[in-house]
Each structure stands twice: as C-alpha cells, then as structure tokens.
Image (spheres, grey):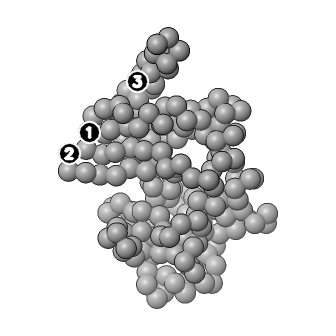
Amino acid sequence: MLHIGDTLVSLDILERQFVCDLAMCKGACCVDGDAGAPLEEDELPALHRVLPVVWDDLAPQAQAVIREQGVACVDEEGDTVTSIVNGKDCVFTCYDSSGTCKCAIEKAWNEGRADFCKPISCHLYPVRVKSFETYKAVNYNRRRICAAAEALGKKGRTPLYRFLRDALIRKFGKDWYEELELCAGEWMKQAKHP
C-alpha cells in the first residue's frame, strides 16, 4: 500500500495494466452487479439537473423506474446508488447500434449538452474508493468482466493509474496524481532491481 495524503492506495493501481475494451465487454460494468453506481452526496443534484437533457436517450423501462423511485435509491449496505432497471441496468444506460451499453450522461457530456460527465464512481471504474474515519482506501475491483481490458492494457503496457489519469485527477486533484506518478516510478525501479 502507498500512503498519499489521506489515501491508502493499493499497489494493484500501479502494477495492473488496463485499458477498457468496449468492443469486447459491451459495457458490462453498467449492467453487471447487484446495485447501481455508488454516488457521492453532491452528485444527486447534478443527476437531477442533467435528467431532462438525457431523458429521451433513456429506455422506457428506465423512465418508468425514475418516475416511480427517482434517479437514486439506498442499497442494502446503506449507500446511495443510481436506480437500476430489472435488477441490472443503471437507469442512465443507453445502447448503441452494436448493442454496446453506454452512459447517457457521458454521451450528453461528449456532445456538449451536459455540464456533468457522469458519477465519479463510474469514471474511476474499476477503481473503488472506500472512505473510513481517517483515510480513504483506493483499490482495484478486479472482475472477470474486465479480462479483455486487462489483455488490452498488457498489450499497450498501460498501467491502470495512467488509464484512469483524468478520473483520478477529478477525484483527488492534480498534486495527488503527480505524487502517485512519482511513487509509481520509484516502485517500478525497485521492482526491477530488488
């Protein structure tokens, strides 16, 4: 583990190689799981603000869930998460012509129609951040659905922290990320020359 500011960072973040491969996984992380995307407190207003912008991109079933219970709910662990459709799809999913699941919020962001990219937990995936009383744990949530992403990362020799550069800076700031890069460089030197 690395200690950076008030975070403890798993060495997997430095050592694992990873690049999302949507052509292979078809966006499985947006539909595979028992709950929606974890949300931070300040993200609920952003979801409500962007909802009218993405409404027509959402499936009728997702619109029905949002009308009935809202954009978010509390899961079994007491965390606020995005609502889901039929026990799997996040309500903000949409599908392209190849059947790939995508985020309607991110689509609107990329098209310049929204001022919110997507929940930070989605942006950071497959990294998960868990807050404790005095620190935050930053861990790689390794799952079978990302096997193709690991293979693509190895092919390009792209460490997970580099693939998630923008998301990590969004969450922790540029200074934190620069310190992570320094630690990664030192860690790799030590790994090569024990």
SS for dot 3: helix
Given the image, on which type of amino acid does mark 3 rest?
Cys
Give the numbered dot on residue 183: 3
For residue 70, above or below residue 134? below
Q: Residues within 10 Å of mark 1 (few under 14, many from 20)?
A: few
Residue 48 seen in this snapshot: no
- Where residue 45 appears, x then y in whole percent? 37, 68
- Where residue 92 appears, x then y in whole percent? 55, 70
Q: Which residue is mark 2?
A: 134
Q: Residue at x 42, y 74 (%)?
A: 72
Q: CA distance from mark 2 to mark 1?
A: 7 Å
Is disc 1 in contact with disc 3, using a CB cutoff of under 8 Å?
no
Given the image, on which type of amino acid does mark 1 rest?
Asp
Residue 16 seen in this snapshot: yes
Nearer the N terminus, badge 2 or badge 1? 1
Residue 26 picture quarter: bottom right
Given the image, on which type of amino acid does mark 2 rest?
Thr
Q: Residues within 10 Å of mark 3 (few under 14, many from 20)?
A: some
Residue 155 picture quarter: top right
In the image: residue 21, left or right of residue 160: right
- Where residue 62 appears, x then y in whole percent? 57, 80
Q: Residue at x 69, y 56 (%)?
A: 25
SS for dot 2: loop
- Where residue 27 appears, x then y in whole percent? 65, 59
Give the numbered dot on residue 6: 1
Is disc 2 in contact with disc 3, using a CB cutoff of under 8 Å?
no
Is disc 2 in contact with disc 1, using a CB cutoff of under 8 Å?
yes
For residue 30, above or below residue 182? below
Return the residue nearer the eye: 50 or 100. 100
For residue 145, above or below residue 181? below
Q: CA distance from mark 1 to mark 3?
A: 15 Å
